[in-house]
Image (cartoon, grey):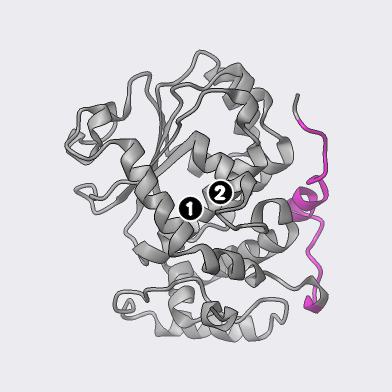
Amino acid sequence: MSATKYLHPFLHGLKPFPEGYEDELQQIREWMKSQPHLPYVSDEYLYLFLHSNYFKVKETKDTIENYFTLRANTPDLFTNRDPLAPKNKQILDITQMVALPNKTEEGYHVLLYRLSEYDYSKLNFADAVRVFCMFNDVKLSEDRISDGYVVIFDMKGCSLGHLTRVTLPALRAFMHYIQNAHPCRLKKIHVVHTVSFINQVMCLVKPLIHSNLLNLVNFSSEGPESVVDKKLLPEDFGGPLAPVKQLHEEQRKNLEQNYRDWLIEAEIFKADEKKRIKKPSRGMFASFTSSFKSLDID
């Protein structure tokens, strides 16, 4: 397949463009023309960024800048995206990443993430973040403009050993991406089967979380059935759907067979720092990128 086909990463096209936002789209398009370091993207992709920012132009510009700059400056996370590469296969072997097939009553998509193997020595955190972002890119491609996402992180099987596998650079990159670059509307983040050391986890993560994201986080010592309608859930949690393992294998196959070429070729979809006219200020993002090689947390 030709990389030209994937100058934007949305294979299926948006549902009809949102009406009444042509002026905002034109402002973003004109701004991008003045930013030679940014790649060309289609109008449907720009609408995704606009929609995720509720059509606020300044915030949309910031998200676009963060999105492409982050992809250029964190190659550990945004290159080597072949789902059949050994490092990525390892993560897909020990985790289950599932988009549940039905939406909430509000029209939100529900995503479920959990470990399928509990041996912490098998976890490479940077690899896990890479595969997580690959999975989410595919979901954005398939869902197109979505009213919102409800995310469930199931901590069953997590141990202090897993916490020792977290590396600060990859964690910072992940939090920066989710909060400042990911073009979707996050509605709720449920952390279920919370572990006894959740306070240690939050001490690690909390300095990296904006207050508006922290307000979306909900903790439950019970399972997913305690936070969303049971009819949305797999049979593992008392719902009517196929088991999580089956859903994961189906969606993994989709990733490996239908999106493999796209994931590899879309690595070119990033800022070109050699063409940047104005260098980033020594602010949050500059300090973030300079610390990417900082020490791991052991």
Task: Look at the picture and state if 211 lies above or below 29.
Answer: above
Q: Of residues 183 and 9, which is closer to you in this image?
A: 9
Whether pointer 2 and pointer 1 mark residues with C-beta atoms closer than 8 Å, the reply is yes
Residue 170 lies left or right of residue 137; in this view the side is: right
Task: Look at the picture and state if 72 lies above or below 57.
Answer: above
Q: In x, y percent, where is residue 85?
A: 62, 52
Q: Is residue 291 magenta?
A: yes
Q: Of residues 171 and 259, which is closer to you in this image?
A: 259
Q: Find residue 171 and report its image quarter.
A: top right
Q: Is residue 139 visible?
A: yes
Q: Which mark is residue 135?
A: 1
Q: In x, y percent, where is residue 276?
A: 78, 75
Residue 221 lies left or right of residue 118; in this view the side is: left
Residue 59 lies left or right of residue 208; in this view the side is: left
Q: Secondary structure at mark 1?
A: helix
If the image is split into quadrants, where does the C terminus sit?
Answer: top right
Q: In x, y percent, where is residue 43?
A: 46, 81
Task: Look at the picture and state if 85 lies above or below 209.
Answer: below
Q: Residue at x 35, y 74 (%)?
A: 14
Q: Which mark is residue 131?
A: 2
Q: Amino acid at mark 2?
A: Val
Q: Is residue 185 visible?
A: no
Q: Find residue 167 and report its image quarter.
A: top right
Q: Residue at x 47, y 64 (%)?
A: 259
- Crowd rating for badge 2 (residues with CA inside 10 Å; few <14, some 14–19, many 20+): many
Stretch in magenta = 275-296
Q: Of residues 261 and 33, which is closer to you in this image?
A: 261
Residue 33 lies left or right of residue 18; in this view the side is: right
Q: In x, y percent, where is residue 64?
A: 59, 68
Q: Amino acid at mark 1?
A: Phe
Tell me the CA gap for discs 2 and 1: 6 Å
